[in-house]
Image (cartoon, rainbow, N blue to C red):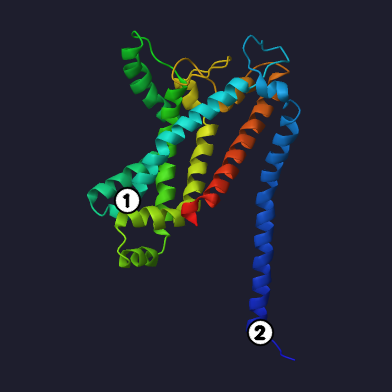
C-alpha cells in the first residue's frame, strides 16, 4: 500500500478541480448553443414544408400565409457557387505561393493584405462592388443602367471569402511535414508535382474545412446581397442579369415585416440555410475523403 505525499495529494486535488472546471466550462458554453439550435429547429419546423421550399414570394402580400423561399434558395446556391468558383482557385494558389515559393517582399505583401482583408466588414465589400462593378462596369454593357445581379453579389462574397481560404490553406500547408517533401525531392520528383501529389492531398481535409467555413460565411451575409443584388420576390435563375434574393436577405426582410405570418417564414428560412450549409459541409468532407489524390 503506497501513501501519497502532501505534494502528490495537492497535485491530485488540483488535477480533479481543473477537470471539474473544464467540464463545467464546456457545459456552460453548450447551453447557449443548444438553446439556439432548439429554438431554430422548433420554430423553423412550424413552417418548413414542401410549399415553403418550392414556392416564391412573387405576388404574395405581407398578410398572406402562403409563399416560400424557393427564389431565395436558388439565389443562395448560385451566389455561393459562383463565389466559390472564383475564390477557391485564387485562395489555394495564393496560399501555395506563400508557403512553397514566396520568400521575399511580395509574399509578405500578400500576407499583409490578406490579414487586412480579414477584418473588412461585409458592407464595405458590398460598397466596393457596388461602386466598381454595378455603377461603373455594367452600365457600359447595359445601355448606361446599373447592373444589379446575383453575380455582383458573388463578387462581393468573394472578397469576404478570399482571406479565409488563403489563411486556412496556408496554415494547413505549413502543417505538412517537411520530410514528405524531402522524400519526394530525393526520388527526383519535381517541386510542382510534389505539391500536387503529396502536399495538397495531405492537407486536403484541412483545406476543405477552411473552404466550407468561407462558404458558410458567404451564405449568411446579407448586406452585400442587399446592396448589389437588390432582392427579388420572384424566381430568377439567371445570376448574371436582374435582381436576385438569398436566404439571409429573405430572413432579414421577413423579420422586419409587421405580419403574423412573416416570423414563421423567417425562422423556416433560417433553418433551411443552416441545413443547406450543413449538407454542403458533409458532402465536401465525404468528397475529400473519397478523393484518390488523398489516399
Q: Quadrant of the N terminus?
A: bottom right
- Nearer to the camera, 206 or 184: 184
Measured as percent of width and height from the top left, residue 86 is found at 40, 34
Q: Is residue 132 left or right of residue 74?
A: left
- Residue 35, relative to residue 183: is it above or below? above
Q: Residue furthest left?
A: 105
Q: Nearer the viewer, mark 1 or mark 2?
A: 1
- Residue 242, relative to residue 271: is it above or below? above
Which residue carries the number 1 mark?
Answer: 98
- Residue 83, relative to residue 63: is it above or below? below
Q: Residue at x 65, y 72 (%)?
A: 15
- Nearer to the camera, 172 or 156: 172
Q: Residue at x 57, y 28 (%)?
A: 248
Q: Is residue 217 visible?
A: yes
C-alpha gap between disc 1 and disc 2: 53 Å
- Say what secondary structure mark 2 lies in: helix
Choose top left, top right, bottom left or bottom right for residue 8: bottom right
Q: Residue at x 31, y 64 (%)?
A: 185
Measured as percent of width and height from the top left, residue 115 is found at 37, 44
- Nearer to the camera, 205 or 66: 205
Q: How many marks?
A: 2
- Nearer to the camera, 7 or 164: 164
Say few, some or many: other residues with alpha carbon within 10 Å of mark 2 (under 14 / 14 to 19 / 20 or more). Answer: few
Measured as percent of width and height from the top left, residue 161 is found at 44, 38
For residue 137, the mark is none
Q: Is residue 252 visible?
A: no
Which residue carries the number 2 mark?
Answer: 6
Q: Residue at x 54, y 21 (%)?
A: 245
Amino acid at each position: 500500500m503506497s501513501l501519497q505525499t502532501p505534494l502528490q495529494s495537492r497535485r491530485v486535488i488540483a488535477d480533479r478541480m481543473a477537470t471539474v472546471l473544464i467540464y463545467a466550462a464546456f457545459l456552460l458554453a453548450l447551453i447557449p448553443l443548444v438553446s439556439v439550435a432548439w429554438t431554430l429547429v422548433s420554430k423553423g419546423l412550424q413552417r418548413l414544408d414542401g410549399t415553403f421550399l418550392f414556392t416564391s414570394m412573387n405576388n404574395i402580400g405581407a398578410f398572406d400565409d402562403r409563399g416560400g423561399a424557393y427564389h431565395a434558395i436558388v439565389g443562395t446556391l448560385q451566389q455561393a457557387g459562383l463565389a466559390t468558383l472564383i475564390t477557391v482557385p485564387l485562395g489555394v494558389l495564393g496560399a501555395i505561393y506563400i508557403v512553397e515559393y514566396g520568400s521575399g517582399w511580395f509574399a509578405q505583401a500578400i500576407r499583409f493584405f490578406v490579414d487586412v482583408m480579414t477584418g473588412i466588414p461585409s458592407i464595405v465589400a458590398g460598397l466596393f462592388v457596388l461602386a466598381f462593378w454595378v455603377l461603373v462596369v455594367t452600365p457600359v454593357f447595359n445601355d448606361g443602367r446599373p447592373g444589379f445581379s446575383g453575380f455582383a453579389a458573388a463578387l462581393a462574397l468573394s472578397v469576404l471569402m478570399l482571406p479565409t481560404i488563403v489563411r486556412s490553406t496556408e496554415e494547413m500547408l505549413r502543417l505538412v511535414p517537411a520530410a514528405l517533401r524531402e522524400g519526394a525531392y530525393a526520388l527526383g520528383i519535381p517541386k510542382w508535382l510534389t505539391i500536387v501529389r503529396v502536399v495538397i492531398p495531405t492537407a486536403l481535409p484541412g483545406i476543405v474545412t477552411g473552404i466550407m467555413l468561407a462558404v458558410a460565411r458567404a451564405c449568411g451575409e446579407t448586406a452585400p446581397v442587399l446592396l448589389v443584388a437588390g432582392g427579388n420576390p420572384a424566381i430568377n435563375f439567371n445570376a448574371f442579369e436582374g435582381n436576385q434574393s438569398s436566404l439571409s436577405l429573405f430572413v432579414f426582410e421577413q423579420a422586419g415585416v409587421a405580419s403574423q405570418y412573416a416570423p414563421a417564414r423567417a425562422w423556416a428560412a433560417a433553418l433551411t440555410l443552416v441545413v443547406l450549409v450543413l449538407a454542403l459541409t458533409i458532402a465536401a468532407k465525404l468528397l475529400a475523403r473519397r478523393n484518390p489524390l488523398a489516399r
